[in-house]
Image (tube, rainbow, N blue to C red):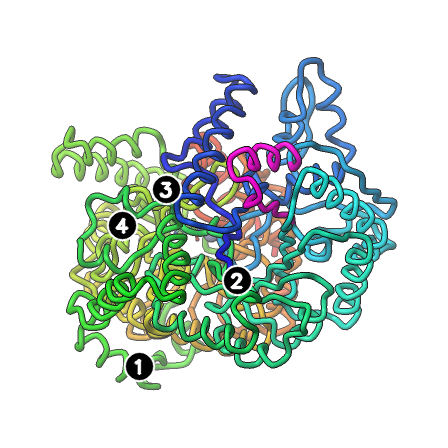
Amino acid sequence: MLTHNLGYPRIGGQRQLKKACEQYWAAAIDGPSLHEVARRIKNNNWQTQLDAGMDLIPCNDFSLYDHILDHSVLLGVIPKRYDAVSAIKGKTETDRYFAMARGYQQDGLDITAMEMTKWLDTNYHYIVPEFTAGQTFSISSDKLFDEFKEARQLLGDKAKPVLPGPVSYLLLGKEKEHGFSRIDLLSRLIPVYVEIIGRLQDQGATWIQLDEPCLCLDLDPQVKAAFAEAYRVLAASVKGVKLLVATYFEALSDNAAVAMNLPVAALHIDLVRGPEQLDELLPLVPDHLELSLGLVDGRNVWKNDHARSLMMIQQAVQALGACRVLIAPSCSLLHSPIDLESETTLDPEIKNWMAFAKQKLQEVAALKQITEGSGSSLLQANQSAMQSRLLSAKVHVQEVKDRVAAVSEAYISRKSVFQTRQQLHRARFQLPLFPTTTIGSFPQTDDVRRLRAQLKKGALTHQQYETAVEEATVDAIRWQEEIGLDVLVHGEFERNDMVEYFGEQLKGFLFTQHGWVQSYGSRCVKPPVIYGDVQRAGDMTVRWSRFAASQTRKWVKGMLTGPVTILQWSFVRDDQPREVTTNQIALAIRDEVAALENAGIGMIQIDEAAIREGLPLRRSKRAQYLDWAVKAFRIASAGVDDHTQIHTHMCYSAFNEIIEHLAAMDADVITIETSRSQMELLQAFSNFRYPNEIGPGVYDIHSPRVPTTTEIVALLKKAAALLPVENIWVNPDCGLKTRKWPETKSALINMVAAARQAREEI
Ligand code: GLN
Ligand code: ZN
């Protein structure tokens, strides 16, 4: 029985890669220095995996920015517009590579970056391959081969090159021209895979991993057929090397037959996301196939329950024989923090329940040892950790469980229907047509960030910090009044991040010192960890909302983050369903909503930026998810009186699929991102006759560009053609924290002018 790993985090234990890349972009270090940092990280990673006792260790999982981009470069899928970068004297392949990732605005060039999108249901973002009708493929980079050579020096035969599989690579890309389907490019692509694999074999490769996560998605029959055909051709041409096809993030379900009949040496399945599939798959495994069991969760921070994993191992060994079973983490460890040992401030009891990437490898090795009969103490230690977590009072709070269990229909419905509430709101708030507002945050300037850093260091007292944040808030209020916004916000100057701010104040959350995970390129996030039943310890936002409201006679919206978004952007418990954890958070938010209402805050916004990204990969699971996600929002929001106006905000645009669920949330006002689609997505709201009020974003906050009044009026006219005029709000696409003040001010002044003009003209 072999142990192996599918991929390892590449940012470095101290985020060295981030720092080196950013220095390189700022021209503070040169190419060789950047590559030296990369070399050290790779070798460290390999050594760690070797020390952990892995039999097969990935290489080419490292990337300076993104491994899918690396693959595009390897295959020569490089859009023409980047030729201009290569043409500049002194520019290297690395410079062109970063130009593809980040765009190039220098030397008189203005070249856009390639599109970036979420990697399946993770918070990792990859660079989307761009295909043309005449797309050709040819080996165009040595990175893969160099890295394999380097890996072999340290790892010998244990080095296992990893590549995106041909079918998933095409599926996860995009056609940039009409008149062809990217899947039809397979016949041109496979010969290049044959060539690549041949070269790796010449270099000594014995195993090669091809990642085909798309085998876990809903697939059309012709795509299923394409899988079979692609691998038939591939297998016919490569001999003597073992191909391992890796699937993850879901069960194979209806693609099981396709996956298991691929003529490859081994298939990896995710038994964390799809534990039930083992029973179904084992009887179907063909004689030629070895099965790799993805046992240790690569997407979370908890220890593996060895007793459970051992049962699955035994079941597989019984069916296939030990020599046809491999064991591994469920997916690449790219999605895990790196090393639990660098955490020095965690509660030791809780730390004993956790495992980061390095520890997960040790767990895989332990599972093998225990299976082979020499790891009884490892098993004992593991089971006592499981037991301690199961019984700990730090996790389990009966009062919270009871409250979740008691949530009833009445609890999740507003007292009156929207139309009644709307009348009350009109009378209470006295807003003009096309009321103007913003989404919540104002620029987080260096000055504001510095305040928090100084507070942390002890260079500011709590009192001094609060006074400084109050000043920033007062300035923002004064300024919003001056330019004539109708509904004000306090600006969120006291918040580091819209999830962390709440996590820090809720019981059941913890924060790591170094638990960074790559989000894209040099950007990393450090998600909070939800370890126990969630409880609100006291007011979280009331102080700031009340303060802001006291500074003005206008209405100031209270500002909260919604339960699904808090869940989605945290590491969550794996000992209860996500739904239950979400409902616990929802109840805590509900109490905060009530506290705001009691403090006289008439409008309360609950941001659910992440509802859509929580959508399950499989269509068949979506309705159920959306049901509980909507219910959680209603738990959070429905406790208020009719005269209180509930807002929500979502920053994305593809709503068609979820429009009825948005309506079921029953927020009085929803603000959404629409400016980049020129209001087109309002069509979905219009077709659905979405009843409640909507603020379609009228300008893009992702760029510093200031929209003109004329442009905004034109967008409002489009909106007015699709929605009842009296339901339309006027606001930017999203919060303004990443912007600078000058452009923010100019843009909002134009926005207010546009609303005034619209009141006259529409
Ligand atoms: N209220 C938050 C802000 O304005 C919302 C941000 C978001 O949805 N991403 O920053
Ligand atoms: Zn947003």
Magenta range is 144-163
Local SS, label 3: helix
Instruction: Determine the residue positioned at 79% across, 43% down.
Output: 195
Identified at 49% across, 66% down, the residue is 693
| Residue 217 locus on image (x, y percent) | 63, 67
**Residue 411's mark?**
1
- Residue assigned mark 3: 480
Q: Quadrant of residue 344?
A: top left
Q: Is residue 55 above or below residue 226?
A: above
Q: Which of the two discs, 2 and 1, sits closer to the camera?
A: 2
Q: Write the residue at 57% across / 58% down.
A: 120
User: Local crowd at mark 2 within 10 Å, few (<14), some, or many (≥20)?
Assistant: many
Kind of residue sitting beneath label 1: Tyr
Residue 421 shows in this picture:
yes
Give the residue type that dot 3 points to: Gln
Badge 4 is on which residue? Answer: 511
Q: Give the mark nearest the N terminus, 1 or 3.
A: 1
Where residue 406 sits: x, y (%)? 26, 84
Q: Residues within 10 Å of mark 3 (few under 14, many from 20)?
A: many
Q: Is mark 3 within 8 Å of ligand 1?
A: no
> How far across and how far down the image is residue 244, in percent?
63, 57
Q: Which residue is mark 2?
A: 326
Three-letter residue code for mark 2: Leu
Please report whichever mark, 3 or 4, sits nearer to the chain's N-terminal start.
3
Q: Counting other residues with Cα less than 10 Å from the Cα at mark 4, is it few (<14), some (14-19), or many (20 or more)?
A: some
